[in-house]
Amino acid sequence: MTGNLKKHISTFEKELSLKNQAIESNVSAIALTDLEGEIIYINSTFLKMFGFDNKNYFLCRHAANFWNKQTEATEIIKIVQETGHWSGELTVKKKNGSKLITLFSASIIRDNSKKPVAMMTSFIDISKQRELENDLETIFNSINDEIAIFNLEGQFLEANQITFDKLGYTKDELMQMTVMDITPPEFRETLREQVFEKLEQGGGIVETVSKHKDGSLVSIELNIRPIEYKGNPAVITVARDTTERKKTETALKASEKKYSTLVENGNDGIVIIQDYLLKFVNQKFIDISGFPKKELIGSPFFNLVSTEYKELSMKRHEQRFSSNNIPNNYEIDILSENGSLIPVEISGSVIEYEGKPANMAILRDITERKTMEQKIRETDLKNQAILNALPDLIFQFTIDGTIIDYRPSPEIDTYVQPKEFLGKKVNEVLPKEIATGIFSSIEQVVKTTKIQRFDYQLLIDGKMNYFEARLVLSGEDSILAIVSDITERKLAESELKKSEEKYSALVENGNDGILIVQDGLLKFVNSKMAEMTGYNLEEPIGTPFLEYVNEAHRKLVLEKYEQKLENGNNNRSRYEFDILSKDGNKI
């Protein structure tokens, strides 16, 4: 009997030792308390998690002392005592006063007779996981594009805040809808076919129209990708409003057509020289040289320059690619087809033509000509899924403006190298006025917790670049700045404004009366027309044009008007008739 007892005792001690080693080496912080919550044991992980180095500090102290909210601790202990178990997220306090978010569980320990003897609790630190989730959610809801996730039937599963804001629906409303509910009927079938086609190809971009809650229709570019969401096949879309881009494209096409007409029909000869060969010539240069176009294109330009000026012109052509200190204008003689010398004034500038450097030369008879403006490049919009799809830079600041992290962009260069800005405040890196704007935006983000937008410009590699920064709160002491390059949009807006101002000045300051008639009604009169008739600019608008025509001439004017509508620009006509001023006089 004594031998068997010793054997049982030895086996029990070994089992107890193994269990103790398992608890002590567990990756979870484990504590044992009595039934009232007083700590009787903690493992090493618990000690490390709470930032202490002496287990005795905890022993015989109530567990609630180390929880962030003691009232919450008391309630949880009560639940465990009553039900035998509780689990969930719990915030605890470390030795230094900082807080940890933990995954907490507690259970009653019973003896062999099922009588409660103690409570066992475990803590898993999930603070970093929650911080990462919060950062991703902040970025997701701060992106300026509409991002949504659908199931394969088109039902909304998730969307970012900008989607709700732009569509005008609440989250609860939108989650009950499908993508076809926000698509006008006439676009649904086409969109359905395009979506399935792109999903079979692994993703892609389509253009369609979305219908907002207020009934307004908006043109969008939709970047579609198949994904797995919560274990099921799904679709993620990034929608970008293309309304302004299409307006800009239309304006740009009109501008290109206008300048193309000027180039082809202007009084100056224009050529593009690349690798010493003529790549483009306009009609005026063909007229000046007398050579047919097919003989000029691809031929050496400097074969057309007289012997006297050939060395000078070649030297200045080569220098133009490497130096800015070249005279803008100089005179040379070119050889015409009949062998005569034609004196021209030539000005040149370096451009990019078909992806390579080239020299654009303008040839004229003595008079100067302004340097031709470079065409505005069409924005190349690239949409990919969420962060990887964004062409934006993302910076992380502390609330005092220190740059602590960043995500590079494949399309935007940083102002300086990362080693020169990481760990520094923005006023140590950026120009004063930009740093001041960022500090002001950070202050507003902290104060209001709302997104702040801030536009600024920087000279990078000798070129002025324009940016939009969107600043959002990320955590208690962190700010995320999402920076977009808006240079092309700014340049397009500037060019369009200049064009509108120029033609508006021509119309308003001309010496002729100008009016626009549509459906027989006056839609516009310029200042000269108002001055001639004695009306102000608003009085005639919307009234029948024939009321201002002398009755004897109305039939003639009506016939000419109808002929013009029928034949359009092919029927240019000039004729005389009398108009009536406000006081009844004939003009």
Image (cartoon, rainbow, N blue to C red):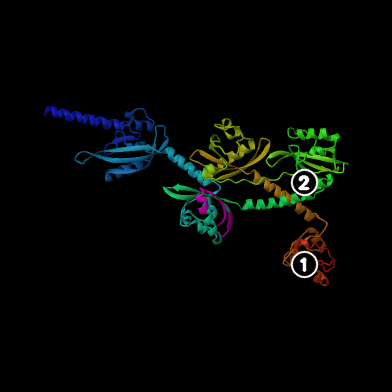
Mark 1 residue crowding within 10 angstroms, few (<14) / some (14–19) / many (20+): some
Kindly identify the residue that appears in the image at 63 percent across and 50 percent down: 245
Whole-percent x, y for residue 122 in the image: 33, 37
Q: Is residue 125 magenta?
A: no
Q: Residue furthest left?
A: 1
Amino acid type shown at disc 2 = Lys
**Tag nearer the camera, 1 or 2:** 2
Magenta residues?
195-219
Mark 2 residue crowding within 10 angstroms, few (<14) / some (14–19) / many (20+): few
Whole-percent x, y for residue 375 in the image: 70, 45
Marker disc for residue 229: none
Q: Is residue 488 above or below residue 193?
A: above
Kindly identify the residue that appears in the image at 50 percent across and 59 percent down: 181
Q: Is residue 255 above or below residue 124?
A: below
Secondary structure at numbered mark 1? helix
Q: Is 187 placed left or right of 3 in the picture?
A: right
What residue sits right under mark 2 in the picture? 294
Q: Is 148 placed left or right of 75 in the picture?
A: right
Q: Is residue 15 above or below residue 198?
A: above
Q: Quadrant of the N terminus?
A: top left
Asked if the residues shown at circle 1 and circle 2 are in contact, with their CB atoms under 8 angstroms apart, the answer is no
What residue sits right under mark 1 in the picture? 563
Q: Earlier in the sequence, mark 1 or mark 2?
A: 2
Q: Quadrant of residue 416?
A: top right
Q: Is 30 placed left or right of 299 in the picture?
A: left
Q: Quadrant of residue 98?
A: top left
Kindly identify the residue that appears in the image at 41 percent across and 47 percent down: 231
